Amino acid sequence: MPRYSDRHGSDRASTRLYVGRLSSRIRSRDLEDLFSRYGRVRDVDLKYDYAFVEFSDPRDADDARYNLDGREFYGGRLIVEFARGVSVTFE
C-alpha cells in the first residue's frame, strides 16, 4: 500500500514540504540536490533555518518526506513534513 494518500489537502499542499532545523551553511542548491533524488523538484524556497521544497508529483514529495525526516544533514537532524497553511504570493 502506498504511503501517499489524499489526506494532505490540495494538490499544492501535498507536493510542498516544510524542511526544518537547517544549518546556516546550507544553500538552495544543497537542498535541490538532496531532494531531487526522490523526483522532480519544482521550487526551493530557503529561509534562514527552514525551507519549503515543492515537487511536481505528490508521490515524490511523500517519498522524500518518508526517507529524509530525521536524517542527518550538515550536522543537524532534518525535520521534513508536509507544509501546512496557505502560501501567499504578492504580485
Image (tube, rainbow, N blue to C red):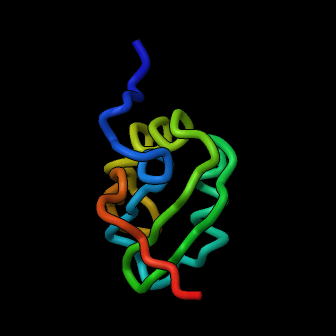
Q: Where does residue 72 sit, x and y in percent of width and height?
A: 39, 56
Task: Report the side of 2 relative to 54 (left or right).
Answer: left
Which image quarter holds the N terminus? top left
Q: Left or right: 72 with respect to 26?
A: left
Q: Residue 14: name its quadrant.
A: top left
Count of numbered marks: 0
Residue at 39 percent of width and 63 percent of height = 19
Above or below for 67 versus 52:
above
Q: Position of residue 28 (x, y in %)?
A: 61, 74
Q: Residue at x 41, y 44 (%)?
A: 65
Could you tell me which residue is drawn at 45 percent across and 82 percent down? 47
Instruction: Report x, y in % for residue 49.
Output: 37, 80
Image quadrant holding the C terminus, namely bottom right
- Residue 79 left/right relative to 47: left
- In depth, the one of 8 and 67 nearer the eye is 8
Q: Residue furthest top?
A: 1
Q: Residue furthest front?
A: 91
Q: Nearer the viewer, residue 23 or 82?
A: 82
71 with respect to 61 (left or right): left
Residue 41 falls in which quadrant of the image?
bottom right
Q: Is residue 72 above or below residue 22?
A: above
Q: Residue at x 36, y 58 (%)?
A: 83
